[in-house]
Amino acid sequence: MLVGLLACGSKAERLPVRPAPAIEVLPDVAFADLDRDQRIELMKTHVIPTLTPVFQRHDPTKFSVVDCKTCHAERNWQMPNAELPQLDVSDLGEFDARDVEWMKNEIVPAMRKVLRDPELRCGRCHPLRGS
Ligand code: HEC
Ligand code: HEC
C-alpha cells in the first residue's frame, strides 16, 4: 500500500503529511455500502483488532481468543446471531448489570464507530424478544 503511494511520484509529494494507517484498503463508507469481500476485510482488519481489547478488558479468561466466532455462529455470517443470549431490551434484569453496562458503554460505541453506523443497537448482534 505504502509502496503503491510512493510510486505515484510527484502526486504523492503533495499528499498531506499524516502518517498512513497501517492498513487502509477500504473506502470511507458505511458498512451497508460495502460488498461482501470488503465486509469480510473490514471484519478482519478493523472489527477484530478494535473489539479484541474491549472484550478482553471485561473478561480476559472467557475472551482470551476473540475471533469471528465470538460474534458469529459457526459458518453463518447472518446477524443477529441466534446463538447469542436473547434479550428483552425493556427488561434486562435477568443479566448481570456489569455485563449490560459493558455492552452499552463499550461494545455498542466501539461497534458503531468501526462499522460507521450510529444506529447500531443491541439487536444487530443479539436476537430480541418481548416488546
Ligand atoms: C465484535 C463482533 C464481531 C466479530 C468479532 C466479527 N463480526 Fe462479522 N459482523 C458483526 C456484525 C454486528 C455484523 C452485522 C453488521 C451489519 O449488518 O450492519 C457483521 C457482519 C458480517 C458479515 C456480513 C454479513 C451480511 O449479511 O452481509 C460478514 C461476511 C462478516 N461479518 C464476517 C466476519 C468475519 C469473517 C469475522 C472474523 C474475521 C467477523 N465477521 C468477526 C460482528 C462481528
Ligand atoms: C457487536 C455485537 C454485540 C452488540 C451490538 C451487543 N452485544 Fe451483547 N454480547 C455480544 C457478545 C459476542 C457477547 C458474549 C456472548 C457470550 O459468549 O457469552 C455478548 C454478551 C452480552 C451479555 C452477557 C450475557 C451473559 O449472560 O453471558 C449481555 C447481558 C449483553 N450482551 C447485552 C447486550 C445489550 C443490552 C446490548 C445493547 C446495549 C448488547 N449486548 C449489544 C455481542 C454484542
Image: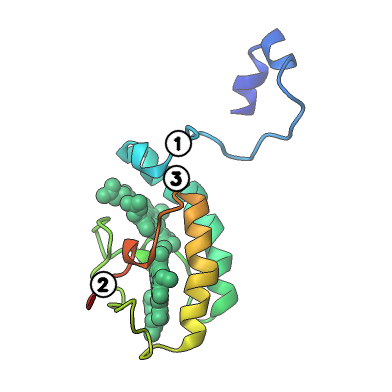
Q: Residue 77: image x %, image y %? A: 27, 55
Q: Quadrant of the C terminus?
A: bottom left
First reached walking from the N terminus: tag 1 or tag 2:
1
Determine crowd level at label 2: few under 14, some 14-19, many 20+ residues with C-alpha closer than 10 A: some
Q: Residue under circle 3?
A: 42
**Residue 78 lies in what quarter of the image?**
bottom left
Query: Please, what is the three-letter code of the amino acid marked with disc 1?
Result: Val
Which of the labelled discs sits on residue 128, or is there none?
2
Amino acid type at circle 2 is Leu
In the rendering, at what x and y percent does residue 6 appear? 67, 19
Q: Residue at the location (49% across, 66% down)?
A: 107
The residue at the point 44 percent across, 45 percent down is: 42
Give 101 or 3, whichever is nearer the viewer: 101
Position of 107 relative to 35 (above/below): below
* Label 2: element kind: loop
Going by the picture, which residue comes out furthest to the right? 17
Please identify the quadrant where the N terminus is shown: top right
Residue underneath mark 1: 29
Q: Earlier in the sequence, mark 2 or mark 3?
A: 3
| Cα–Cα span, label 1 and label 2 | 27 Å
Q: CA distance from mark 1 to mark 3?
A: 11 Å
- Across and down, in percent, residue 98 comes to 52, 85
